Amino acid sequence: MRQVCVLGLGQFGSHLCRTLVKMGCSVLAIDANEQRINDIRDDVHRALIGDARNFLLLKNAISDAVDEAVIALGKTNIEPSILCAVNLKKVGVRHIASTARNQDHAQILRAVGVDEIIFPEQDTAERVARRIATPEVRDMFSLADDYRVMEIVAPKRLHGHTLAESDLRKDFDLLVIAVRDENAPRFKFLPGADTRIHPNQVLMVMGRELDIARFAGLD
């Protein structure tokens, strides 16, 4: 079970905590606001009232078993997130992610050792834009660089063809890692080359975002 510490329980931080728990993670939530801690106490494994800028608090609260810390501070003031990041590095947290207000804030966070920058509103806007521009794309998550895993309704041109006949690896540099009928609850992973594509079938594909977009626009 991955252990995650979330610092800051605004709308983003609180939702992140609850989602991580649903996905099987052990979550430590920290916030200086007592009401926010009380609101989430029953939904996470541990919840502490405290200032995320306090080095001794973080040192005592975060064990070596913590895999990642997510800083969800700095919506109105960037100082808390920067000081928190510095202290998390001192504590020895292996991977630190943080929300950022803008690119200048992000640059400072990277300079003090933050590994991953999150722009909640920008990321959400890009996700919604992808859904509007390519409605065939159902869902997605990012991998390294520009690679994505996406769910796409099978284009009509592929209906009745096998994966081998479609040859998506050659034409689009895509890999089909799972398939399911539209109303089926679960995917069938690692489909064989002789798997035939049917109407209303959903394909889970992996590849570069531009290539996925080209594939989604086949029809």
Image (tube, helix red, strand yellow):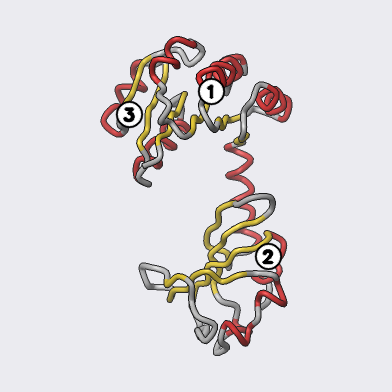
Q: Residue furthest bottom?
A: 160
Residue carrying label 2 = 213
Q: Secondary structure at mark 1?
A: loop
Give the Cα distance between marks 2 and 3.
39 Å
Image check: 164 left or right of 146? left
Q: Badge 2 local density, few (<14 within 10 Å), some, or many (20+)? A: some
Among numbered discs 1 and 2, the one appearing first in the sequence: 1
- Which of the 4 image quadrants contains residue 193? bottom right
Q: Badge 1 local density, few (<14 within 10 Å), some, or many (20+)? A: many
Q: Secondary structure at mark 2?
A: helix
- Identity of the amino acid at label 1? Leu
Rendering coords of residue 95 (x, y %): 54, 33
Q: Is residue 167 above or below residue 129?
A: below
Rendering coords of residue 79 (x, y %): 61, 14
For the point 63% across and 83% down, the residue is 166
**Could you say which is closer to the camera, residue 193 or residue 132?**
193
Among numbered discs 2 and 3, the one appearing first in the sequence: 3
Q: Badge 3 local density, few (<14 within 10 Å), some, or many (20+)? A: some
**Could you say which is closer to the camera, residue 33 or residue 109?**
109
Rendering coords of residue 155 (x, y %): 60, 78
Give the Cα distance between marks 3 and 1.
17 Å
For the point 42% across and 69% down, the residue is 187
Residue carrying label 1 = 73
Quadrant containing the N terminus in the rendered view: top left
Q: Is residue 179 above or below residue 149?
A: below
Residue carrying label 3 = 40
Rendering coords of residue 53 (x, y %): 51, 13
Give the Cα distance between marks 1 and 2.
34 Å
Q: Residue furthest left?
A: 42
Q: Secondary structure at mark 3?
A: helix
Q: Is residue 10 above or below residue 55?
A: below
- Identity of the amino acid at label 3? Ile
